[in-house]
């Protein structure tokens, strides 16, 4: 039997950095998702908040994070290293999450959530850029698919642990929030011991946040991505809608766990497919599926419909996440990946505040049908813009040169 060449072995095995970042994301999301599915009910029932305040919490937290992602991404290009940024980002989030357990007023929860998102803002762009730095272009879809799969696997384990804890210790939600510090700190230890910087030359120039060096196709993609993110509904509202359709609060973590398992397994499978088909066809398919899910969420009336739609919504993430990140990495030069992922994550975050506030207001004033229908229309517009990108720059975005 013929033995595979060293080149084949090398491309079949994920780089060490990618594997350690996946393990860290697993632990980090166990910590995060132990508490996230419970936050909407905790805010409204325990702290006396409302749907509009929920929109403010999610929007403000993500907007703070988005500004940091842009600047830190460019800063990691200039510094010539990325590990320190990643460690600080995971560390801040690990220490911030348990603060939710001390909240007695809605603004306390907002503050804890904002600090958590500061940590995310510091780590995200350098982490995504380091995955690209560590991986050959032909394997980027698989690398991002693996990382997102581990991330979502943690998001499945976290709610399962939360449900088990609350069944054993009812009415101990604050203690559960405090316990989230343990897996959060494990993610930091894993990265501190295992992660290695990819040697790069340090830039002596000042940090510049210009889009110009990233190219026209990338800027075109950002326009489409802005509208997609503006139409994207916060997962907190999806959980709230599931509760309205009759799913009991005690079972929301189970629904969230199933949702995350679909994302995890799907990310790994579709990540491999990205390397075969290119990112754009899958991105279009995922955005179209998102429109369908929102329309049916608007008209759903039964608990079983919420469960089915949640699983389909997990498939949206599974299809789009590896494709989005692979497209970003393929469109820009090696020295600008931090800046590119900074802009990518900045656009995602800057659209989150008006999106969440608008959706929360529509939901509060006009009901679920208008709110979900509006989001479906905005995502449809994003899909049309993405089709134009495919038509105008197909040869570039599908066959970008190796950087």
Image (cartoon, helix red, strand yellow):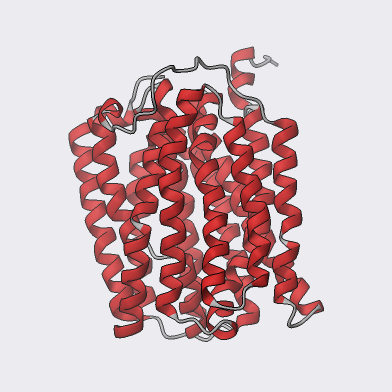
Residue at image point 62% right, 41% down: 88
- The answer to whether 252 appears left or right of 223 in the picture is right
Residue at image point 56% right, 78% down: 105
Residue at image point 42% right, 61% down: 60
Res 144 seen here: yes
Quadrant of the rendering where the N terminus is positioned:
top right
Total numbered circles:
0
Quadrant of the rendering where the C terminus is positioned:
top left
| Residue 29, quarter of picture | bottom right
Res 5 seen here: no
Q: Residue furthest right?
A: 168
Percent position of residue 367, x then y: 33, 84
Q: Nearer the viewer, residue 72 or 291?
A: 72
Q: Is residue 200 above or below residue 300?
A: above
Residue at image point 30% right, 67% down: 375
Percent position of residue 134, x then y: 56, 25
Percent position of residue 325, x then y: 43, 39
Percent position of residue 138, x then y: 47, 25
Q: Nearer the viewer, residue 9 or 104?
A: 104
Q: Nearer the viewer, residue 38 or 262?
A: 38
Q: Is residue 187 above or below residue 259?
A: above
Q: Is residue 214 above or below residue 120?
A: above
Q: Nearer the viewer, residue 172 or 160?
A: 172
- The answer to whether 235 appears left or right of 212 in the picture is right
Q: Is residue 278 above or below residue 115?
A: above
């Amino acid at each position: 039997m013929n033995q595979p060449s060293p080149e084949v072995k090398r491309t079949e095995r994920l780089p060490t950095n990618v594997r350690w970042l996946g393990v860290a994301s697993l632990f980090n999301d166990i910590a995060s998702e132990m508490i996230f599915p419970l936050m909407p009910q905790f805010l409204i029932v325990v702290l006396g908040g409302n749907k509009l305040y929920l929109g403010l919490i999610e929007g403000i937290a993500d907007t703070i994070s988005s500004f940091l992602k842009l600047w830190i991404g460019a800063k990691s290009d200039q510094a010539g290293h990325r590990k320190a940024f990643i460690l600080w980002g995971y560390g801040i989030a690990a220490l911030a999450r348990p603060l939710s357990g001390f909240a007695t007023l809605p603004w306390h929860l907002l503050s804890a959530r904002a600090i958590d998102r500061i940590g995310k803002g510091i780590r995200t762009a350098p982490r995504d850029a380091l995955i690209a730095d560590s991986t050959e272009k032909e394997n980027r879809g698989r690398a991002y698919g693996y990382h997102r799969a581990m991330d979502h696997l943690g998001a499945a384990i976290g709610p399962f642990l939360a449900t088990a804890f609350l069944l054993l210790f009812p009415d101990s939600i604050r203690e559960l929030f405090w316990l989230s510090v343990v897996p959060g700190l494990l993610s930091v230890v894993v990265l501190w011991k295992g992660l290695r910087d990819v040697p790069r030359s340090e830039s002596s120039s000042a940090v510049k946040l210009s889009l110009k060096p990233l190219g026209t196709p990338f800027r075109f993609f950002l326009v489409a991505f802005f509208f997609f993110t503006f139409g994207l509904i916060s997962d907190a509202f999806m959980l709230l809608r599931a509760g309205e359709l009759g799913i009991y609060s005690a079972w929301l973590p189970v629904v969230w766990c199933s949702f995350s398992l679909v994302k995890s397994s799907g990310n790994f499978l579709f990540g491999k497919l990205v390397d075969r088909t290119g990112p754009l066809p899958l991105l279009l398919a995922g955005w179209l599926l998102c429109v369908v899910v929102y329309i049916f969420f608007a008209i759903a009336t039964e608990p079983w419909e919420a469960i089915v739609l949640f699983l389909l919504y997990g498939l949206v993430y599974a299809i789009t996440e590896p494709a989005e990140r692979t497209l970003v990495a393929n469109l820009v030069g090696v020295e600008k990946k931090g800046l590119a992922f900074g802009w990518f994550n900045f656009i995602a975050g800057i659209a989150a505040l008006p999106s969440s506030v608008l959706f929360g207001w529509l939901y509060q004033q006009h009901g679920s049908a208008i709110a979900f229908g509006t989001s479906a229309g905005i995502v449809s517009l994003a899909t049309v813009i993405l089709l134009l990108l495919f038509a105008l720059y197909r040869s570039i975005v599908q066959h970008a040169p190796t950087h």
